[in-house]
Image (cartoon, rainbow, N blue to C red):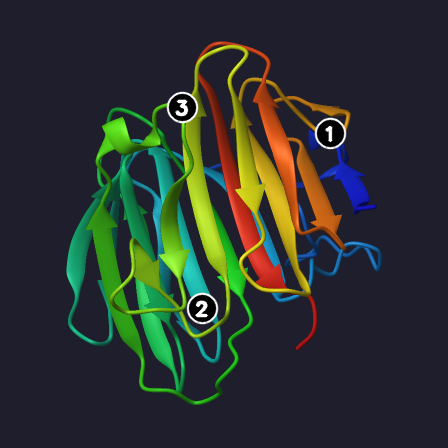
Amino acid sequence: MANTILHKAETRGHANHGWLDSHHTFSFANYYNPERMGFGTLRVLNDDRVDPGRGFGNHPHDNMEIISIPLSGDLEHKDSMGNVAVIKSGDIQVMSAGTGITHSEYNKNTDRVCKFLQIWVIPNQRNVKPRYDQITLDTEELHNKLQQIVSPYQDDEGVWIHQNAWFHLGNFDKDIEVQYQVKLAGNGVYVFVINGQFTIENINLNTRDGLGITEATGFTIKSGSQDSEILLMEVPMKF
């Protein structure tokens, strides 16, 4: 029998900095909740809204796998490795901070907001050489099925990170059922509803709700509304 922990959207931490409106599923910056320190090696899940022309100035990271998933708008990235790129909805960005990296992220547009998910995963190797990568998804691959967007393997679908973690995205019509099989015994899966409604393990989930699932080998996902979008993050529970 699977164990579950439900995080309703309205229970998340919230910080409004004016130019940045951010909701924190787990403890981050000034939001601290001892019961929300992460889910296994999933340490940060921030739901960010950035005003036109604003963004995060140059700042450092180390020993963290950082995944960005744009939901709308265009986010311009610059880093100390010389990478300059713009990511938009349909793109997936990953940085392995490793021994240390500095970067900035700005809303490239002056006329509309940018929304994206910022996710941190604790790596299984410390002090690796920093790296950056991004891909553009084929949106047809997301329709009524789960498309792998992150894995531990360089030659697999999506981007890769230094952790035994697998992420999947899917966009579903109403009343579609799919099965998810856990890739590695002992891993947990954190489900985040980007939009719409889903039912998992007899639990009804709505937009921006999160559900942690452990002690499961697999589970059924059923969409409850048209254009329902979901993100699954399978991660090791021990680190």
Q: Which residue is mark 2?
A: 65
Quarter of image, res 61: bottom left
Q: Nearer the viewer, residue 126 or 32?
A: 126
Q: Which label lies toward us, 2 or 3?
A: 3
Mark 1 surroundings: few (<14), some (14-19) or many (≥20) residues within 10 A: few
Sequence-earlier tag: 2 or 3: 2
Q: Amino acid at mark 3?
A: Asn
Q: Which residue is mark 3?
A: 144
Task: Residue at 26% x, 68% y: name it.
Answer: 132
Q: Say whether marks 2 and 1 touch (CB < 8 Å).
A: no
Q: Nearer the viewer, residue 73 or 64?
A: 64
Sequence-earlier tag: 3 or 1: 1
Look at the numbered disc 2 and give the secondary structure of its residue.
strand
Q: Which mark is residue 96?
A: none
Task: Residue at 34% x, 43% y: name it.
Answer: 54
Would you place residue 209 above or below residue 26 in this image?
A: above
CA separation, marks 3 and 1? 27 Å
